[in-house]
Image (cartoon, helix red, strand yellow):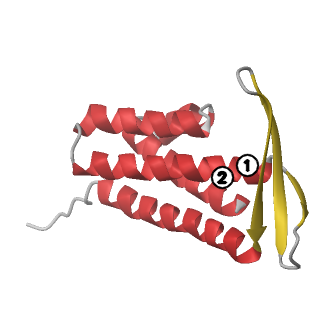
Amino acid sequence: MTVSFAALELHMQAVFIFLVDESARIGHILASQLSFARLRTSILALHKERYGENSDYLKLKDFMARAAKIEEERNNITHSFWGAGELPDTIIRLKITVHSKRGLNSDNKVYSESMLNDFAASIRQLTDEFIEFYVALLPLPKTNNP
């Protein structure tokens, strides 16, 4: 999950760098300072600025919504306590948070190995779609054919 999420973020940064339309070095400097949420927002804003709200923009909005859900689940998984489940092939995630309006809150969820594998696969699927999107954005190489 962690490796897959890092790959997703790397490819999102590649799209960001392309959309910034500066040197890769400048793009990396800017991208490295963005949280995942700000990276998503910046990609959408840059694409809208450069190309408007075309069909690619709508596809990108879908990608960003999926990425937000993935980030939320990844954060829940990463920043939780874990314990043995009631069944031999399950584990329980326990997340304790405090909110100014609701006070102390605890959330738990039972996971199986297949659920975690499916989640990691969904991250890889979005990454693959993002790579295809990025490749389609790239300008075609110029040929020197007469």
- Residue on which disc 2 sits: 73
Left or right: 69 in relation to 85 = left
| Residue located 49% across and 53% down the image | 66
Quarter of the picture containing the C terminus is: bottom left
In the rendered image, the vertical position of residue 143 relative to residue 63, given as above or below: below
Q: Residues within 10 Å of mark 1 (few under 14, many from 20)?
A: some
Identity, as a three-letter code, of the amino acid under mark 2? Glu
Identity, as a three-letter code, of the amino acid under mark 1? Asn
Q: Position of residue 91 (x, y in %)?
A: 84, 67
Left or right: 102 in relation to 130 = right
Labels 1 and 2 touching (C-beta < 8 A): yes
Q: Is residue 21 visible?
A: no
- As measured in the structure, the alpha-carbon distance from the residue carrying label 1 to the one carrying label 2 is 5 Å
Quarter of the picture containing the N terminus is: bottom right
- Residue on which disc 1 sits: 76
Q: Position of residue 114 (x, y in %)?
A: 70, 77
